[in-house]
Structures are given as C-alpha cells and as structure tokens.
Image: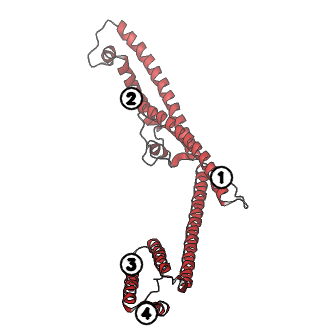
C-alpha cells in the first residue's frame, strides 16, 4: 500500500497567486506579504511530507489528514476554499479507499488465522483420537466455523481429562514396578517399555495396548514375587527344623560348618541365604529373563 504525496508544487503556487491578484484588490506590498506567507506554508507542507515519507503507512496517513485539515482551515480564512474544494474531496475519497482496503486486509488476516486455528484443532483431534483409540468426531457440513471450533475445544477438554486419568494410572504402575524391582532384584532392559515408563517425562505409552503390556508384566512380576516368597518360606521352615535338630545335638560343631553358621546368624541372614538359593535355582531354569520390547 502506498500513499501519494500532496500534489503541491511551484506551478500550483503561481496559479493560486495569479488568482489572488485578480480577485483581491491588495496593493503590491500586501500581496507580496501574503504571497510570501502562502509560499512559506506550502514549502512547510512539502517539507513535512518529505520528512515523514519514511515513516510507516499509518503515521503517514494520519499526518496527511492533519495537513489537509490545517491547509483547509487556512484557505477558508482567505475566502478561496471553493477553488480547491474538489481537490480536497478527491483526497478524502482516496483516504476512504485506503481505509477500506486496510480493513479488507485485516479481515483477510483474521480469516487466515481462523483457518489455521481450525486446521490445528483438527490435527490435535486426530492425534488424540489415535493415541486414545477413540473414534474421530464426525464433521457436520453445515456447521459454522466458530461453532465447530467451540465443539472441537469441548471435545479436546474431554480427551485431556481421559489423558489425566491415564497419567494417574501410569503413576500407580510406576510405584508397583519400583516395589517389585526392589523385592526381586530385577533389572530392566533399556529399550523396554517398562524402563521408559520409569521416566516421568515419558508419555508416549498412553495407548491402551502399551498399558496392557505394562499391566501384564507387572502381574507376571507379582506372580514371581509370590513364588519367591513361597520358596523362601519353605526353605526357612526346613532350615529352622535343621537348626532345632542341631541345637539338640550335644556335639559342638566346627566354626566353619553349616551348623555353626545357622546357630550364630539371625533369621534375616537365613532368609538372604534362601533368597540367593532361589535366584540360583531360577537362573538354572532360565526364568529370570523377562523382556518387553516397545
């Protein structure tokens, strides 16, 4: 958009001066003074417009309007506003056209903004529906743009609530997993889904399938934990019976014998020995290798 400079030059100044000489009965001295003032003011207008030409369009338009009003007021006091009334009207029409064009550009920008917002909401809708295995919302052909945006926002709010519930479920899974890892001395593979679950910033496991795999592994680990507890309890019972039998024996066993170790260690140490035995047994059966790949 460009703004035209006010069409004032030396030829127009001379034309106006000749008109004033014919219509006014001023003497030469008064005419020269008035002509000098008009010329100075005209030069001032030209200088102001040239200086402001490098400023942005909005300021230049405002300056032009102010200059027109000031020039119109000064000419009205001389009684010659009718001579340039048509020129001022043309300038006003030009300003109106520029204003209308500017409004059209603003409306185009708003329309593009709404279209981009609608596209973004549609993309978010599709991605969330894919993540949560939900059905994509039907598109109503006759629905207005604003109503569709509002409906999409409401739908996204519902999906966000479901996402929050999934995050709560993942948090409970993380607690269960940490407890089982401590109890079983279980090590996870780095690329596994469960190891990624330990990262609090990891959220791509929100799909129902991923949660199902996580739940399956947790159930499997809990079963192994129960199996370990049963195995250890059986061994502890056997060792307690053996310890009671050794206690009834009058013979003093050597310090390095199993009987001496059983007599002089706490029950917790016995459980650790049993647990190590259970781990060795599981290793022989190749049951400790649990891997879930993403």
**Most distant residue in the right direction:** 142
Nearest to N terminus: mark 1 or mark 3: 3
Residue on which disc 1 sits: 151
Secondary structure beneath disc 2?
A: helix
- Kindly identify which residue carries mark 3: 48
Nearer the camera: disc 2 or disc 4 = 4
- Measure how far apart labels 2 and 3 are at the Cα level: 94 Å
Q: What residue sits right under mark 2 in the picture?
A: 276
Tell me: residue 176, above or below residue 152: above
Looking at the image, tell me whether mark 2 or mark 4 is earlier in sequence order: 4
Measuring from the top left, give residue 183's x and y in whole percent. Answer: 43, 30
Which residue is at the front of the view, 31 or 85? Answer: 31
> First in sequence: mark 1 or mark 2?
1
* Residue positioned 58% across, 73% down in the render: 100
Q: Determine crowd level at label 2: few under 14, some 14-19, many 20+ residues with C-alpha closer than 10 A.
A: few
Q: CA distance from mark 2 to mark 4?
A: 113 Å
- Residue 14: which numbered mark, if any? 4
- Crowd class of label 1 (few under 14; some 14 to 19; many from 20; radius 10 Å): few
At a point 33% along the width and 15% down the height, the residue shown is 259
What secondary structure is marked by label 1?
helix
Give me the C-alpha separation between circle 1 and circle 2: 60 Å
């Amino acid at each position: 958009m460009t703004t035209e400079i006010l069409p004032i030059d030396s030829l127009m100044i001379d034309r106006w001066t000749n008109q004033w000489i014919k219509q006014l009965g001023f003497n030469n001295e008064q005419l020269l003074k008035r002509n000098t003032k008009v010329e100075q003011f005209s030069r001032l207008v030209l200088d102001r417009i040239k200086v402001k030409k490098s400023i942005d369009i909005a300021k230049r338009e405002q300056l032009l309007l102010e200059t027109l009003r000031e020039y119109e007021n000064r000419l009205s006091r001389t009684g010659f506003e009718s001579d340039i009334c048509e020129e001022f009207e043309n300038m006003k029409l030009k300003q109106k056209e520029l204003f209308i064009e500017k409004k059209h550009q603003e409306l185009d920008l708003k329309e593009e903004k709404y279209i981009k917002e609608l596209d973004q909401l549609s993309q978010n809708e599709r991605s969330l529906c894919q993540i949560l295995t939900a059905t994509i919302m039907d598109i109503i052909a006759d629905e207005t743009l604003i109503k569709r945006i509002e409906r999409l926002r409401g739908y996204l709010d519902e999906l966000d609530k479901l996402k929050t519930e999934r995050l709560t479920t993942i948090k409970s899974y993380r607690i269960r997993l940490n407890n089982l890892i401590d109890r079983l001395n279980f090590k996870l593979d780095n690329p596994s889904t469960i190891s990624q679950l330990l990262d609090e910033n990891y959220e791509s496991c929100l799909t129902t399938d991923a949660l199902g795999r996580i739940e399956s592994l947790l159930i499997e680990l809990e079963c192994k934990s129960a199996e370990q507890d049963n195995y250890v309890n059986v061994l502890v019972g056997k060792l307690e019976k053996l310890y009671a039998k050794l206690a009834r024996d009058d013979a003093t066993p050597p310090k390095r014998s199993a009987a001496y170790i059983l007599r002089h260690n706490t029950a917790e140490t016995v459980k650790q020995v049993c647990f190590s035995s259970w781990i060795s047994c599981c290793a022989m059966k190749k049951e400790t290798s649990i891997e879930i790949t993403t």
